[in-house]
Every structure is written in structure tokens, then in C-alpha cells.
Image (cartoon, rainbow, N blue to C red):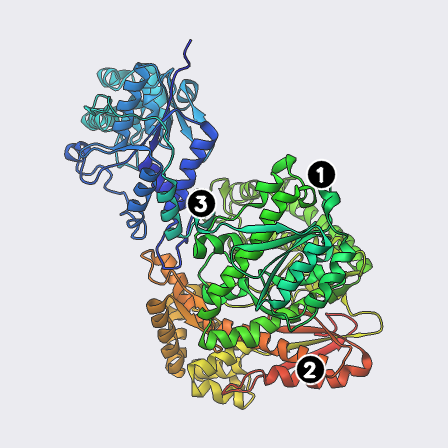
Amino acid sequence: MTKPQRLFLIDGSSYIYRAYYAIRHLSNSQGLACNAVLGFTKMLLKVIREHNPDQLVVVFDAKGPTFRKDLYPEYKANRAKMPEDLVPQIPYIKQVVAAFNFASIERSGFEADDIIATLARQKSAQGCEVVIVTGDKDLMQVVSERVWLLDTMKDKLSGLDEVAERFGGTPDKVIEVQALAGDSADNIPGVPGIGEKTAKQLIAQFGSVENLLANISEVKGAKRQENLRNFADQARLSRTLVTLVDDMQLEMDSVDFSLREPDSAQLAQLFKELEFTQLYNEFAPVEVVTAQLSGTYSCVTTPEQLSAMLEQLRQAPYISLDTETTSLKALEADLVGLSFAVEAGHGWYVPVAHVGAGAEEQLPLNQVMEALRPVLEDAQYPKVGQNLKYDALVLRRAGICLAGIVADTMLMSYLLYPASRSHGLDSMAAEFLQHKMIAYSDVTGSGKKQIGFAEVALDSATQYAAEDADITLQLFHLFQPQLEGELRTLFDNVELPLLQVLIEMEWVGVGVDCAQLDALSADFANQIEVLEQQIYQLADGEFNINSPKQLGEVLFDKLGLAHGKKTKTGWSTAVDVLQKLADQHEIVALVLEYRSLAKLKGTYTDSLPRLIHPDTGRIHTSFNQAVTATGRLSSSDPNLQNIPIRSAAGKAIRAAFIPAPGQILLAADYSQIELRVMAHLANEPALQRSFVAHEDIHQRTASEIFGVFPEMVTDEMRRRAKTINFGVLYGMGAFSLAKDLGISTKEAKQYIDSYFARYPKVSDFIEKCQAQARQQLYVTTLLGRHCAVPDINSKNGQVRSYAERNAVNYPVQGSAADIIKLAMVKIQQRLQDQGLATKMVLQVHDELIFDVPPSELEQVKQMVQQEMEQAVVLQVPMAVSMGWGDNWCEAH
């Protein structure tokens, strides 16, 4: 017996909106919104890959009114207008459908649901199994023994049983129930006072709307009878509106709905324009790529081959290098092999630790390292690479101190193309060279069957590894002439030398007191247990405090607290929601404290001891140089930038960070650097005078705004002025300021107006930043860094507003980031030049931490303060606060 064909009907119009709201705030570097296109594409791929249909049709709503609108002008009248930033995405979505070679259909005067109903009836009658991909309950009236609904976002398949459960009967009852209950989403009126539950009961009793209307006297309740009599015609109209047309003349019999191979070239072009790098890599035609960039790569396994390669390395103007290892963590990684390239399309791979067939041919690690040492450790041979900090640390662990780093393509891309979503090698190869890289999983496999790189056969390993070095070199030559002017100065004077600083910092690591962390974990556990019992007592019963659903039920249903927005799982219990409720009930403050302690315990006191390196006894965080939009460094594995500063628990955790034995921990922190930078960039004389006079800037702002003498400023006035100072810095509007200060929006606007009246140049600065962003899609820092603001011209008001705030914040925060980076470079240079034993071990926001021998403390304090305060010359003085002690907390 022949297996029936499986036809999937995609409710395209429904999924456009679902995709739009599922992925928010996404645009390419040119500011084109593309969230709906990405979500829609992923939905299509999910259907194809998980369900493997035989046939597929995408159905869209056509422009213009439908026959339902003619019948009832108020039909869908309460539907919001299509979001402005969704409108330009519709053509791209349809181009994606066409490039996948999917059949698609739309008909004026009808809705997509009518087309789907017609195709489902016709095709199921012809023996097909039909799956309608939608989240729309209206299509339940089409379900049959051969027709199902599939909601891919919930992974839910609905058939006759699900229809019966939802509407109390067979699919034909869907129409009857909806005619009575109406539909607020489509503005179908139904009968007042009758919801879906009551409608199900009435249709179960009477069978249909007409039979119900013919027997109104048998309906329980005088008011319900009255409504049915008064709104009988409305019920009949509603029935007509909800009934899908399933006999349209589509003339689609000759159309082939079978799945065909996609037009990969067209898809790749679309995904390149939209900057969907992962999808581009997937669909970029391999044959085109191979024709453009075919590499000739050699595996070096003999002393003669190694010598020949070394000779070419010595003669090359630049050496591109890459390492293959056993771990993504540099200080735990053993070398498996090294790759090199000195000209485009050629490269070498030197295996040193492969196992299995062919591994006996490779040269010993020690022999390779000693042969490479004279080149790798000599700065006269210029080195380039991709994320070279990792390779330098791996080589250092293997006994090689890499010298002569002149470029890192990741950092070059980060400066040149700040709007790019990724500065990874695969993404850059796709975007700038139209080249599809060999994926790691192509040579190692994936999932449970994945093997380590050391187990990869040498021929495959050579192609993969040497390609990395080759493409890195090609990107270097592409980027090199593009780095001009301020960006070149920023690269040469800040980012590249900072790379060397970070290598040293990661190599040294930071000390931690494991015993103290263990004791803190135990203490936090006790405090959490006490809080749990207190919360249970106030809730009059135990529940899972970590479950937002259960917590919401306790707070809002059981205790009756004022609730806010509802999520898919229940009432929102986000931190900002709970903070507003903290004065309404004692339980809320306890829950907030419980969450804070539980997070600190899980993130730090439980986790940090496991991250202590077994060989060094220290923690080696990774500093990320090419991640943030502003140029700020971030840290990971572990993230040490989010430890609370002011709370007692946060201070206790900081006290566990200690210097090397016999040394002192020195902390140097910029004071209000971002406000000082803004005073400089805005050229606001009133602010500048305050900083020059070393005044309390928040007190001065309070004095100006509230019109009182400085000595009359109260603590509350100062607190509000501080919030305003930083609020303006971060582009905060009246609504957000009112929320932060707990005042009316009107009062907040008065504060802001008063602020700008006193500091008019700040207002000019804000307008200038936003104007630059609108024109160039980026703003610049003091040292010329470009900070991307691609969404500044978005049609979506919320997205645009966020971008406008960033346009103000980025130049200030980015300038502060550039300043501390420059200070780090200068301090490290002086430490080396003076032969000091002091080590820079951490950078956290505006703060630098050092391990200092007691004999060097006074000298280092003076030197660090000098370099930090004089890193750049502003129109206001920079101030650095310093502290030292036996741990990080004491040093504050």
C-alpha cells in the first residue's frame, strides 16, 4: 500500500507576527530591522528538518479588505496597525520563501485561513495527510481524520481529540461555539455575557446556534435568554464571520507542491545582506566557495619539511599562526598541532599530538617547539592571528613566549565593523571573503559521537587547521589598509598593546582564599534556610521559591498583592516588579534577599573554588577585548565584574580575593570618570568648574536644580541629584527617572528641564550625539572608537528610543573604557621598564587591582596614580582613589 503524501500548509501571515514578537530588537549593521525574517526562516527550517514533509505551501493574507469586512465593517477593527519596522521585512520574508522554492499563495478578498481551509479539504479528499502549521484556534474547524494542526512554537499537534477537549465536540461545533462566544482578537461580537465555557455548554445541549435560538425559552437564566433574543442576528452574523470558506476556486490542481532543492545562491545572498552569518554559512554554495578560495595545504611530518617551512616563515613579511588544542580554556589546553600561512591559498599544519592512524608520522612535540622557538620568540618576525591571546597563552604553557604580535584580525574587525554581530573567523570569512569555512564539526563530528581534535585524521586536520591560518592572513591583508586615522592610532596605541597586557594578567591570575569561600557558602546556606522558613511562614505553606509560577501564585493570588504583566507561565515576578512591592508585604523583601543570596552562592562562593587552577592555585579569568559595544573589557570563566560592591555579602566575597603570599593587594579606582568625561565632551563650563574646584558634583547639581545653597542640600536632594546626573548620562527620560526616584513623571520632567537649564551644553551634547548616530549609524569616543548604533532610525519607537539613549551613553562610557585601557598599557610598560615585581591582576570597570610586594608599595602607588590620572588630558582633572590591604575588600 502506497504511503499517503504529507502536505504541510504554513499559515504565513500568522507566523510573521509570531516571529516578529518572538525575536525583538534585531537589525543589521545598516539599521534594517530583520527580527521577523530571522524568526520566520528558522520556523520554516524547523518544519522541514523535524517533520520532513512531502509537500509544502506557504499561505499569506493578501492586501486589501476581505468579504468579511464588507459584511461587518468593524471586523478586526481593534487590530493594531502593523508595526512600522515590520513592513519592510515582508518582502524579504517572501523572498526567503521563493528562494527555498516553496509554493506560496494569496488571494485578494479572502484570508489565508480560507485558502488553508480550501486546500485542506481538497487535498485530504485526494488522500493526502494535511498538517496546518499555525497557532490559530479558528482552524480547528478544519480538523478531520486526515487534517491536523501543528503549533511549532509549542511543539503541539492537535487532532480530533484536542478539538473535542477545547470546544466540546466535533470540528463543526467550533463554528457554533465561536459564534456565541465571539472573538475579541478579530472583533467578532458574539452574544454579550456568553464566553467560551458557556458557549460550549449551550452547543453541547442544543447542537447549533440556530437550534439554540429556536429554543431560547429552555435556556437557564432570564438575562441570558434576553441577550440571546436581543442579539440573535449578531450571533448569526458572528457565525458567518467565523466560518472559513473551504470551496474557493484556487485553480491549483496543476501546481506542484512537492519540496524542491532550495536556491542556495539566492538564500546565501539574502542572508549575507541581512547579516545572518550562521544561515549564510549553511547555504553558501560550496562549489562557488571552492572556486574562489581553493587552499593548497601541507602536513609537516618530517624534519626536512619542518626546515623548509621555517625557511619560508623567516623570509615572509607576515606569519599567520593558529593552534589546535585539547581545550577552549587556554591555561588548561595542550597543543595538538600548529598551523601557519605566509601567502593566500597556502598553509602548513604541524601535528604534534595526534593519535590513531597516521599519527606515527608526526614529529615529537619537543623537537617541533625547539625548531620553532627562534622564530616564535623573535619579534623581528611579525605575527598575525585571530584571537591571538588564546594562542599566546597556549604556547606559553608549552614553553614558548610568543613575540612580534603585530595584528589580531578579531580586534581589527572589532574596530572597523563594530556593528557586526560576530568577529569570529567563520563569520568574517563569510562576510568579507564570501568563503565558507570548514566547520569544526565537519572533522570531529558532533553530539555523542564527537571526537577530540587529536583523534582527527591528519589529512582532514590539515585542511581544517591550515585553512584557519590562511583565511586569517587574507583577512589581515584586507583589514590592514582600512585601519586609518584615529582607528589606526587606537589599534596601535591601545588595543594591540593591551592584548599583551591581558596575556600577562590572564597568565598571572588572581589569588582567592578557598577556605573563606567555603565558609561563606556554608553561611549563605544557613541564611537562605532561615529566609526560606520565614517566607513559608508568611505564605502559610511551603512552595518552590525559585519557581516564578508558584511564587506568583503565592504573592498575587494567595496574598492578593498588586500584580503587573502576565507571562506565559503566570504573573511576572521579575526583580523590578518585586522591588515596587517591597513596602506592601514583608514577604517580598525576604524573597528579594533570598534571591540575592542564592545567586551569590551559586555564582561565586560555590563556583569559584572549582575554578582554581590546580597548578597555580589561582583563578585565571578570561578578559574579553572584542565583545561590548563601548569598548569596555568584560570577563568570563568566571565573570568577576558583577560582584556587588555595597552589600555585606558582596563585600564578604571580595574579601576572599587575596594577594600572592607575602604581598599586598592594591586597588586603584577612577572617581566619577564618566561624569568627568561628559563634562569634557559636552564642554559644559558649570560642570567643569565643579570638578576643577574638587566640589561634590552631586551636591553642586542638587544646589543648582533645587535652587538652594550647597550647605542646605539634604541627603535626599543629593540622592536625587546623583540619580539625575547618571540618568542624563545614560539618556534617561522623565518616565524612567520618575520610576527610579518614585515620583511623578511631571515632577521628573521638571527636574530634567531644570538640569538642562543649568547645564545647557549637556543638552547640546545629547542632540549632537543623536544627530551623528542618525547620519552615520555610529558615535565616536574621545580616542576615535566607533560605537555602533544601527537601530537609531528604527520605525519601532521602543527600539529607536533605546538606540537614542545609547547614542548619548556610548561616547561617554566608551571614552572611559579607552582611558582605562590606555592607563593599563602605560602602567604595564612602566612596571616592565622599571623591573618591578608588581603584577596587574584584575580590571573591573573603572578599577585596577595589583599584587604588590610591600617594598614596592609606595613607588607603585605613585606611579599608578600618575599614569591613571594622566592617561589623557581632559578639561577637568581625573581623580583616582586608592586603597590597599590583605584582600580586595580591605583595599576599598
Q: Which mark is residue 279?
A: 3
Is 679 located above or below residue 281 in the figure? below
Disc 2 from disc 3: Cα separation: 47 Å
Q: Which residue is mark 2?
A: 830
Question: In the rendered structure, which amino acid carries the disc numbered 1?
Answer: Ala
Residue type at mark 2?
Arg
Q: Which mark is residue 357?
A: 1
Give the answer, above or below, for where 833 lies relative to 255: below
The furthest residue to the top:
1
User: Residue at point 68% right, 61% down?
Assistant: 621
Q: Sort mark 1 into few (<14), some (14-19) or many (20+) by Cα contacts within 10 Å.
A: few
| Secondary structure type for disc 3 | helix
- Mark 3 or 1: in front is 1
Residue 481 position (above or below residue 523): below
Expressed as whole percent of the image width and height from the top left, the position of residue 77 reads 23, 41
Categorize mark 2 by other alpha carbons within 10 Å: few (<14), some (14-19), many (20+): some
Q: Earlier in the sequence, mark 2 or mark 1?
A: 1
Q: Which quadrant of the structure image shows residue 439?
A: top right
